[in-house]
Amino acid sequence: METLLIVDDNQQITEILTEYAKKNNYDVLVAHDGEVALELFHTKQPDVILLDVMMPKKDGFAVCREIRETSNVPILMITARGEDFERIMGLEIGADDYIVKPFSPGEVMARVKAVMRRVRPIDISKQTFTYDNLKINLDDYTVTIQQETILLTKREVDLLWTLATNQQKAYSRDELLDQLWGFDYFGDTRTVDSHIKRLRAKLGQVPHPTWEIKTIWGVGYKFEVLNHEKQ
């Protein structure tokens, strides 16, 4: 049975979400502030996290940033604020989805299930990809450049895998959104841009002069080979 960590300082909300989560066969952990949330994350290793933004001690953004330093666990952020810049901030620091209050508990659980469906490898027929100094391994969701591990989220690995294993194809933002987030995702194409920006920054930690993630203006993105050597 998978474990869901619910983090919200509103006890009524946590009680309602706990009831719905148990009906959907999740074990449930509850935290009412950011510090307790991090303690439960480190000690219990939940499979998925519902994380409120406005909380005592540490807010949801701080908690998400700290978790992303060591883990790719799916995180769905919950907030009463609906401003675009806050939603984009949540996605840029590694959240997998963003839910605005008020919401129905049924919708929240549907979002959780959608995210959990996407944490499995996207192509079970092959598990590794190598080009020059880049290696992607879907067995353990690791990415290395020149044998140096690059810490990426599950979504970032999926995004890199999709582009790298289809080098001849330029993907539109809509295609990437549909393929990686699914038709039931409630975001928009700026989500793709945010993830590409963060992915490029992390990959840029190690030189990779023979390839890049290229912006194709008016289309989207592709994995660009910068020489004519075949892998």
Image (spheres, rainbow, N blue to C red):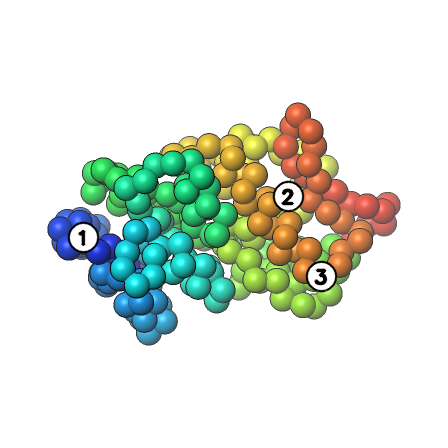
| Residue sitting nearer the eye, 182 or 203 | 203
Report helix, strand or loop for mark 1: loop
Q: Give the amino acid at mark 3.
A: Val
> Image height check: is 40 above or below 222?
below
Q: Give the amino acid at mark 2.
A: Leu
Residue 163 is tagged as: 2
> Image height check: is 140 above or below 96?
below
Residue furthest to the right: 228
Residue furthest to the top: 218
Residue 213 is tagged as: none
Report helix, strand or loop for mark 3: loop
Provide residue 158's location: percent of width, then percent of height: 55, 49
Residue 206 is tagged as: 3
Residue furthest to the bottom: 43
Residue found 71% across the figure and 40% down from its top: 214
Circle 2: is it few (<14), some (14-19), or many (20+) Cα within 10 Å? many
Kindly tell me whether residue 90 is visible in this rendering. Answer: yes
